[in-house]
C-alpha cells in the first residue's frame, strides 16, 4: 500500500514537472523542473529495485548535466522568451495531437500486456550492486571501454567547439 | 503483498515520452528542445528499468535480467556526451548568430 502511495505521488510529480519543462517560457524554470522530474524518476528506480541507477541518475544527470545546462543558459543569457514562439500555430496543434496519440498507443500497448500485471517480490541479488558490476566488467567490458573513449572524444569536441576562434591576422600583416 | 503493477510504470513512461515529443516539436528555443529530448531519454530509461524488473521475476539467469540496467548505464553516459557536445554547439551558434531561436537558424534549410 505504501508502495502504491509513493508511486502515485512521484508519478504525479514527474508528470507535472515534465509538463512545466516543455510549457514554461523561461528555460531556467524548464531546467529546474527537469531536475524535479529526474529526482522523481530516481525514486521510481528505487521502487523498481535499481538503487545504483537511481544514485547515478541524481549524480550524473541532476548533478552534472543540468548544471551544465544552467551554466550555458547563464552564459548565453537567452532567458528572455523567444520572439518567434507564437508563429507555429498549425504545427503546434499537429504536434500535440501526434504526441498524445503516440503516448496513448504506447500506454494501451503496455496496459494490454498480461505479463506486466503480476509483481513478485524482488530477489536480494537483483537489487545488489555486485551482479550488475560483474556484468558490466565481464560481458559488457568492450562497450564500457568504448563509452569511456566516447566521453573523452566529447570532452575534446566540446572544448574545440566552444573555444573562442583565434583572431584573424589582418591582410597587410602577413 | 502486492506491489505496484508494472504497467503503471510503462504508462507513465509513455506519457512522459509523449510530453517530451510535443515539447521537441513545438518549442522554438533550442535549449528547451534539448531539454525535451532529455525528458524523452529519461522516460526510455524508465521503460528499460521496468522491463528489467519484469525479466527479473521471469528469467532464471540474473545476467539476462540485469542487461536492461546495463543499457540504462550506457544511455546515461551517452546522454552526458551528447549534452556536452550539443551545448558547445549552441555556444558556437550563439557566438555567430546571436540567437538560439530555431526559426532564425535556417542557413542550411532547403
Image (cartoon, rainbow, N blue to C red):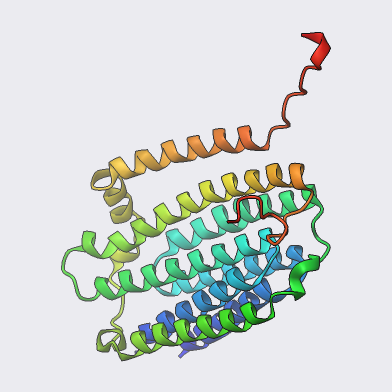
Please report the residue visible at 47 percent of the width from the left and 55 percent of the height from the top. B76
Please report the residue visible at 57 percent of the width from the left and 51 percent of the height from the top. B83
Q: Residue furthest top?
A: A174
Residue A26 picture location, percent across and down: 78, 67
Q: Nearer the viewer, residue A76 or A49?
A: A76
Instruction: Residue B3: tell me if it is visible.
Output: no
The image quarter containing residue B109 is bottom right
Please report the residue visible at 47 percent of the width from the left and 88 percent of the height from the top. A4
The image quarter containing residue B31 is bottom right
Q: Nearer the viewer, residue A46 or B7?
A: B7
Instruction: Residue A45: tell me if it is visible.
Output: yes
Q: Nearer the viewer, residue A32 or A21?
A: A21
Q: Is residue B1 left or right of residue B90?
A: left
Q: Is residue B97 left or right of residue B30?
A: right
Number of numbered markers: 0
Q: Residue furthest left?
A: B60
Residue B52 picture location, percent across and down: 31, 69
Q: Is residue B54 above or below residue B81?
A: below
Amino acid at each position: 500500500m505504501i508502495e502504491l502511495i509513493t508511486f502515485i505521488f512521484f508519478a504525479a510529480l514527474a508528470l507535472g514537472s515534465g509538463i512545466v519543462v516543455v510549457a514554461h517560457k523561461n528555460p531556467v524554470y524548464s531546467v529546474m523542473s527537469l531536475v524535479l522530474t529526474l529526482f522523481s524518476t530516481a525514486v521510481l528506480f528505487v521502487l523498481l529495485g535499481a538503487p545504483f541507477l537511481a544514485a547515478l541518475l541524481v549524480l550524473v544527470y541532476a548533478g552534472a548535466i543540468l548544471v551544465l545546462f544552467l551554466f550555458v543558459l547563464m552564459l548565453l543569457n537567452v532567458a528572455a522568451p523567444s520572439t518567434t514562439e507564437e508563429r507555429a500555430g498549425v504545427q503546434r496543434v499537429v504536434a500535440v495531437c501526434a504526441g498524445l496519440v503516440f503516448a496513448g498507443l504506447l500506454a494501451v500497448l503496455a496496459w494490454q500486456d498480461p505479463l506486466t500485471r503480476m509483481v513478485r517480490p524482488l530477489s536480494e541479488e537483483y537489487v545488489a550492486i555486485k551482479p550488475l558490476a560483474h556484468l558490466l566488467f565481464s560481458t559488457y567490458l568492450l562497450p564500457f571501454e568504448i563509452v569511456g573513449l566516447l566521453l573523452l572524444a566529447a570532452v575534446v569536441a566540446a572544448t574545440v567547439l566552444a573555444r573562442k576562434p583565434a583572431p584573424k591576422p589582418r591582410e597587410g600583416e602577413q | 503483498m502486492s506491489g505496484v503493477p508494472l504497467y503503471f510504470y510503462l504508462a507513465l513512461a509513455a506519457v512522459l515520452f509523449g510530453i517530451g515529443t510535443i515539447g521537441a516539436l513545438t518549442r522554438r528555443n533550442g535549449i528547451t528542445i534539448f531539454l525535451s529530448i532529455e525528458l524523452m531519454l529519461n522516460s526510455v530509461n524508465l521503460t528499460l528499468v521496468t522491463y528489467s524488473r519484469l525479466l527479473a521475476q521471469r528469467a532464471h539467469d540474473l545476467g539476462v535480467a540485469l542487461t536492461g540496467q546495463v543499457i540504462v548505464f550506457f544511455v546515461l553516459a551517452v546522454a552526458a556526451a551528447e549534452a556536452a557536445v550539443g551545448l558547445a554547439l549552441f555556444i558556437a551558434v550563439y557566438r555567430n548568430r546571436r540567437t538560439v531561436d530555431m526559426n532564425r537558424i535556417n542557413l542550411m534549410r532547403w
